[in-house]
Image (cartoon, grey):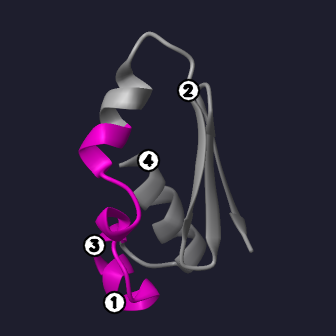
Amino acid sequence: MATLTALGTLEKVDPVELPDVLGTTLYDHIDPEALDTLVAGEERVDLSFLIDDYRVRIDGEELTITRQ
């Protein structure tokens, strides 16, 4: 949810409206349930992926989203 909330803030829309604005869904790029499992675990997570024009990076507990 943090990823969708942050993207919604960047796009200035409700996260529910993101598929209409971006023309894609989070699920088209990464399995949200797997992502939740990774970040909820005990291990430190460092991963990144692209959604539309944004690079999403999760480094430990820090979420960073930048426009590409």
Give coordinates of residue 20: x percent, y percent: 33, 89
**Residue type at tag 4:** Ala
| Relative height, residue 37 to residue 41 (above, below) | below
Residue 67, image x, y percentages: 72, 72
Mark 4 and mark 3 in contact? Answer it, CB < 8 Å: no
Checking the image for residue 45, the label placed there is: 2
Q: What element carries label 4?
A: helix
In the rendered structure, find residue 16 and report the number of the disc placed on it.
3
Amino acid type of the residue tagged 3 in the rendering: Val
How packed mark 2 is, by other alpha carbons closer than 10 Å (few <14, some 14-19, many 20 or more), is: some
Sequence-wise first label, 3 or 2: 3
Q: In which quarter of the image is the C terminus?
A: bottom right
Marks 2 and 4, the one that precedes in the sequence = 4
Q: How far apart are marks 2 and 4 (CA)?
A: 15 Å
Q: In which quarter of the image is residue 50?
A: bottom right
The residue under the point 36% across, 65% down is 26
Q: Mark 1 points at which residue?
A: 20
Q: Is mark 2 on a helix, strand or loop?
A: loop
- Which residues make up the magenta segment? 15-35
